[in-house]
Amino acid sequence: MNTFTKTITKLTAVAALALSSTVASADTALELGLITPIQITDDITSVRGLRIGIIYTENADVTGLDINVIAGRVRGDFTGLQLSLINIIDGNMTGVQFGGVNIVQGEATGAQFGFVNYDNMGNGAAFGVVNYATSYHGLQFGFVNYARELEGLQIGLINIAKNSELYQVLPILNFNFKF
């Protein structure tokens, strides 16, 4: 079993555990929403289980499976699997994101699949048309890849690693590793 398959298996287990675990008093196991504030709980409640939204759903922290048709926002941290046209996380993300636009203001650990992936700090793999990170450790695979600080590999049409000791901008392949 390769590393990617192992990661997906672990994240699925985390989501299943979150769905079946006991929920603390300030948390909910299920969030359903049309557009914030029209949702089961308020936007300061954390979700430990399943969150489903139609237009825009917002919560404090989310752990588990997060599905939003248009957009979803997590004001704190996210752990699990997130599917939406637009995913916004103000805190840290551990898991996998599938979306048109994936934004993580804190640290992203895992994988992102989208047209645009933005991370303040990223660890793992980002697959997109445009991948942008202030700091990235891992693989960026896309047409345009940018990292102010890269420790890893970029594969794409235009690859920019501002801290590269060789070339900051390269087509096809760019890398920066610390040995």
Image: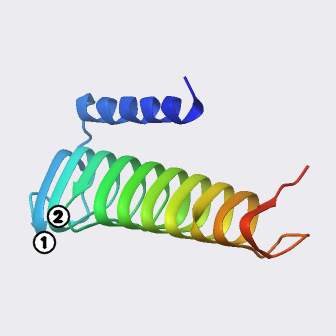
Quadrant containing the N terminus in the rendered view = top right
Q: Position of residue 93 (x, y in %)?
A: 47, 54
Tell me the element at label 2.
Answer: loop
Residue 76 badge: none
Q: Quadrant of residue 145?
A: bottom right
Q: Residue at x 13, y 72 (%)?
A: 37
64, above or below 32, in the image: above
Say left or right for 160 vs 118: right
Q: Position of residue 136 (x, y in %)?
A: 67, 61
Circle count: 2
Q: What is the crowding at mark 2: few (fewer than 14 residues within 10 Å), some, or many (at least 20)?
A: some
The residue at which mark 2 appears reads as 42
Asked whether the residues under the numbered discs 2 and 1 touch, taking CB atoms below 8 Å apart as contact, a structural biologist would say: yes
Q: Residue at x 24, y 57 (%)?
A: 45
147, above or below 137, in the image: below
Q: Which amino acid does the dot numbered 2 rest on?
A: Asp
Residue at mark 2 to residue at mark 1: CA–CA distance: 7 Å
Residues 35 and 133: in front is 133
Of circles 2 and 1, the one toward us is 1
Q: Residue at x 58, y 52 (%)?
A: 125
Residues 62 and 122: in front is 122
Q: Residue at x 75, y 69 (%)?
A: 149
Residues 81 and 98: in front is 98
Q: What is the crowding at mark 1: few (fewer than 14 residues within 10 Å), some, or many (at least 20)?
A: few
138, above or below 132, in the image: above
Say left or right for 107 vs 152: left
Tell me the element at label 1.
Answer: loop
Comes first in the chain, label 2 or label 1: 1
Residue 37 badge: 1
Q: Position of residue 89 (x, y in %)?
A: 41, 65
Q: Which amino acid does the dot numbered 1 rest on?
A: Pro
